[in-house]
Amino acid sequence: MADGSALVLGGRFEVGERIASGGMASVYHGTCVTPDDRLADRPLAIKILHDHLTENPSFVRMFRDEGSIAARFEHAHIVRVHDVAHDQGKHFIVM
């Protein structure tokens, strides 16, 4: 963040350096900050809906549906979705 403090979403996920950005969202390196969490030692990616789209219920619904649908899949060649949530005005998917 601009002031040097880390953005932590859902009290669990610290948002790191941006990996990529698209028309609907940006993807960041992520870290689970709760030590006893099952995700604590795993590399994570956090996809965050662009701020200007959070005001549009259709985009929010599409984004959340994307995460919820992807979470149903379990395959070695498909990224696993761990969480779909909203915190601090941010809609995000943890992978």
Image: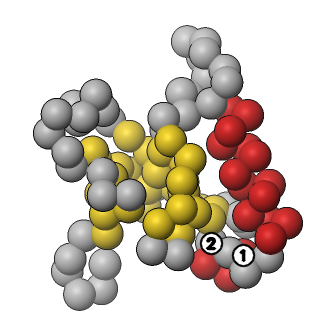
Tell me the residue at 69%/51% (across/down).
Answer: 64
In the figure, is residue 68 to the left or right of 36? right
Numbered label attached to residue 53: 1
Residue 22: give x, y in percent of width and height. Answer: 67, 61
Circle 2 sits on which residue?
50
Residue 68: give x, y in percent of width and height. Answer: 68, 39
Secondary structure of the residue carrying numbered label 2: loop
Residue farthest to the bottom, as pictured? 3
* Number of numbered tags placed on the structure image: 2
Residue 40: give x, y in percent of width and height. Answer: 23, 35
The answer to whether residue 23 is above or below residue 83 is below
**Crowd around label 2: few <14 · some 14–19 · many ≥20 (10 Å):** some
Q: Quadrant of the N terminus?
A: bottom left
Residue farthest to the top, as pictured? 76
Labels 2 & 1 near each other (Cβ < 8 A): yes
Tell me the residue at 80%/55% (across/down).
Answer: 62
In the figure, is residue 92 to the left or right of 64? left
Numbered label attached to residue 71: none
Residue 89: give x, y in percent of width and height. Answer: 53, 75
Q: Amino acid at mark 2?
A: His
